[in-house]
Amino acid sequence: MKPTQIQTPTGPCFTKLAEVDAQYAAANGYITGLERPICDSFGTFNGTQYLGSQAFCVAPDGSQIAGFMVNRWEAVDMDCKCARDMNAYQNTGIIGLKFSCDRFGNYARTGCYGSVCYCQDRSGNPIGDARVNIETLGTLKC
């Protein structure tokens, strides 16, 4: 029977995490202003990261997505899914899609495609059958 081989986690976030942990170890604990990155199981950065009193959205490689930064204590339900989807789409160079993100980088409660608006879930998918013209978006109850 072969012994189980332990794989070292790889990916940009795990690499950064190892660097931060080494800095903590070298300093015997706490370093002001140094935050451990939050990684997903694939070794990429979780959408929401923190630095001091701020929470912000990042791409899977850890690069910050402009326009999505809030106070840390406000970031309870911050998932940055919309900000990440929008960032990935913009990086393709293709134009045409419009993303409806709230200030936390989450999908807003309403979304629009062209001049037609609808309620959407936390993944940006339309929910329900209600559709209104963009001019009457305020009448949509989501």
Image: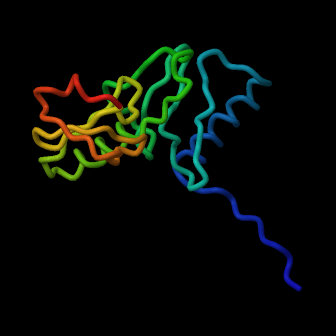
Q: Toward which corner of the image does residue 108 lie, by quadrant?
A: top left
Q: Toward which corner of the image does residue 98 lie, by quadrant?
A: top left
Spot occupied by residue 22 in the image (x, y as percentages of width and height): 70, 36
Spot occupied by residue 120 in the image (x, y as percentages of width and height): 34, 40
At 58% from the left and 48% from the top, the residue drawn is 40
Spot occupied by residue 11 in the image (x, y as percentages of width and height): 54, 53
Residue 59, placed above or below residue 34 = below
At 65% from the left and 42% from the top, the residue drawn is 18
Residue 12, placed above or below residue 55 = below
Q: Which quadrant, please, contains the C terminus? A: top left
Spot occupied by residue 82 in the image (x, y as percentages of width and height): 36, 39
Q: Which quadrant, please, contains the N terminus? A: bottom right
Residue 68, placed above or below residue 126 = above
6 relative position to 136: left or right? right
Residue in the foreground of this view, choosing between 35 and 77: 77
Q: Residue furthest bottom?
A: 1
Scheme of image coloration: rainbow
Q: Toward which corner of the image does residue 141 lie, by quadrant?
A: top left
Residue 66, placed above or below residue 87 = above
Q: Residue furthest right?
A: 1
Residue in the foreground of this view, choosing between 32 and 103: 103
At 56% from the left and 56% from the top, the residue drawn is 42
13 relative position to 27: left or right? left
Tally of numbered tags: 0
At 76% from the left and 32% from the top, the residue drawn is 25
